């Protein structure tokens, strides 16, 4: 049978399909950012995305710090880097980590009246950045805590300076490492000579409210030292797990100081390690514990903890990671902001100086540190205006 060409009807269909395909044939290759709508590519959201896409789990802040330093320098800031000691078991093989102190390049001095500060590190694990164009929600590790604050503070500073709303010498930026692991970045900054600021605005998720205070913090480890033996002959050993468990139960039921403002002090048994195998009597065991202190100096809670453990077993050891700190009162006197208390710790206690201190940022702490950490575009944009209002209010105060 001879092959017959397409009928007139099919010729028309083929012609239409050919015309419709022209834009796709000649379209330019898509860029990596084209997966997001144009709105997400505005400077604020683009900066936020770049920050979140770079993993920066505590101890590994080098790459995000290098990116942010380059970004600030490209926007006419002078950036000073302060090297901070390595952190972690493999610290010697990791890239160096730095605090970043930035001030306008055209400022006659690096001393300013107001400091905006947030932290570069996140808790593990890294969760990739995603954007939902229908709900305008951004998800990923650090989208709330604390890269939303970084992006909003930088954007607010650039806006205020470029519009000449404030003089260059009035504002600086500080981004530190290690907030999530005890504040070693802010401690390092505070340990060397630094400018005396009138006002410091700390960035943390506060639901766009001013925090009027936050609970204190106290961390410690309880360690049991036993004797290993074959599990079939337990009387030849001493079970470290069996020593530790009753003490943890006592701590879990321990009554710690209470206050009307912050409520109960809370104790979290966060990590337990003990033993080598099911057929070996454990030689050692330990538990890492965190207390959110609602009242009194941390020494009061320390004494209660030590006494509770010693009453169970005098052979157990209690090691406090640091002296800790009690509840932190925070300024909240700027008109137009709602206020609240928060139960988490911050870098506020680690920055020495006689300055007013504010705590503010987008997003909820209830979403931070979780597998569903997320933030709305609207809240991120509102945070920029909030930081601008706080800076302007601070500069009006003498």
Image: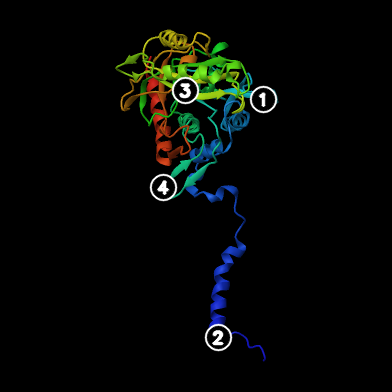
Q: Which residue: 53% across, 9% down? A: 315
Q: Is residue 362 visible?
A: yes
Quarter occupied by residue 283: top right
Residue 74: percent from the left, percent from the top?
Answer: 59, 33
Residue 119: percent from the left, percent from the top?
Answer: 52, 26
Q: Are marks 4 and 1 in contact (CB under 8 Å)?
A: no
Residue under pointer 1: 90
Q: Is residue 356 above or below residue 366?
A: above
Residue under pointer 3: 269
The image's mark for residue 8 is 2
| Of residues 165 and 217, the one drawn nearer to the viewer in this rendering | 217
Lateral position of residue 387 relative to residue 234, left or right: left
Separation of marks 1 and 3 at Cα, in angstroms: 25 Å
Q: Earlier in the sequence, mark 3 or mark 4?
A: 4
Which element is circle 4 on?
loop
Quarter in which the N terminus is drawn:
bottom right
Separation of marks 3 and 4 at Cα, in angstroms: 36 Å
The image's mark for residue 135 is 4
Q: Are marks 2 and 4 in contact (CB under 8 Å)?
A: no
Q: Is residue 177 visible?
A: no
Q: Residues within 10 Å of mark 3 (few under 14, many from 20)?
A: some
Separation of marks 2 and 4 at Cα, in angstroms: 47 Å
Q: Earlier in the sequence, mark 4 or mark 1?
A: 1
Which element is circle 2 on?
helix
Between marks 1 and 3 in the image, the one whose residue lies nearer the viewer: 3
Q: Which residue: 49% across, 49% down? A: 38
| Of residues 110 and 206, the one drawn nearer to the viewer in this rendering | 206
Residue 309: percent from the left, percent from the top?
Answer: 46, 12
Which element is circle 3 on?
strand
Separation of marks 4 and 1 at Cα, in angstroms: 40 Å
Between marks 3 and 4 in the image, the one whose residue lies nearer the viewer: 3
Q: Earlier in the sequence, mark 2 or mark 4?
A: 2
């Amino acid at each position: 049978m001879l092959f017959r060409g397409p009928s007139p009807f099919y010729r028309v269909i083929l012609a239409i399909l050919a015309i419709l395909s022209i834009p796709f044939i000649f379209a330019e290759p898509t860029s990596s950012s084209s997966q997001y709508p144009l709105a997400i590519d505005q400077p604020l959201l683009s900066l936020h995305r770049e920050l979140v896409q770079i993993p920066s789990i505590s101890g590994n802040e080098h790459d995000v710090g290098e990116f942010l330093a380059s970004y600030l320098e490209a926007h006419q800031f002078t950036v000073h880097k302060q090297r901070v000691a390595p952190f972690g078991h493999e610290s010697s093989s990791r890239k160096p980590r730095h605090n970043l102190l930035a001030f306008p390049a055209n400022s006659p001095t690096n001393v300013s009246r107001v400091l905006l500060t947030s932290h570069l590190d996140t808790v593990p694990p890294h969760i990739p950045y995603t954007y939902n164009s229908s709900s305008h929600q951004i998800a990923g590790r650090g989208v709330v805590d604390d890269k939303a604050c970084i992006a909003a503070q930088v954007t607010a500073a650039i806006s205020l300076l470029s519009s000449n709303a404030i003089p260059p010498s009035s504002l600086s930026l500080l981004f530190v490492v290690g907030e999530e692991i005890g504040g070693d970045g802010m401690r390092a900054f505070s340990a060397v000579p630094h400018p005396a600021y009138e006002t410091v605005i700390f960035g943390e998720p506060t639901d766009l409210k001013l925090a009027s205070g936050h609970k204190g913090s106290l961390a410690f480890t309880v360690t049991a030292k036993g004797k290993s033996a074959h599990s079939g002959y337990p009387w030849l050993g001493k079970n470290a797990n069996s020593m530790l468990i009753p003490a943890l139960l006592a701590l879990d039921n321990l009554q710690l100081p209470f206050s009307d403002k912050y409520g109960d002090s809370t104790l979290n048994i966060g990590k337990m390690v003990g033993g080598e195998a099911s057929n070996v009597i454990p030689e050692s065991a330990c538990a890492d514990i965190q207390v959110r202190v609602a009242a009194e100096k941390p020494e009061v809670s320390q004494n209660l903890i030590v006494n509770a453990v010693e009453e169970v077993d005098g052979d157990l050891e209690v090691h406090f990671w640091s002296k800790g700190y009690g509840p932190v009162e925070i300024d909240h006197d700027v008109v137009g902001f709602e206020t609240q208390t928060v139960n988490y710790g911050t870098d506020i206690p680690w920055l020495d100086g006689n300055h007013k201190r504010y705590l503010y940022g987008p997003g909820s702490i209830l979403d931070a540190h979780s597998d569903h950490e997320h933030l709305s575009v609207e809240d991120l944009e509102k945070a920029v205006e909030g930081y601008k209002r706080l800076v302007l209010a601070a500069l009006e105060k003498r």
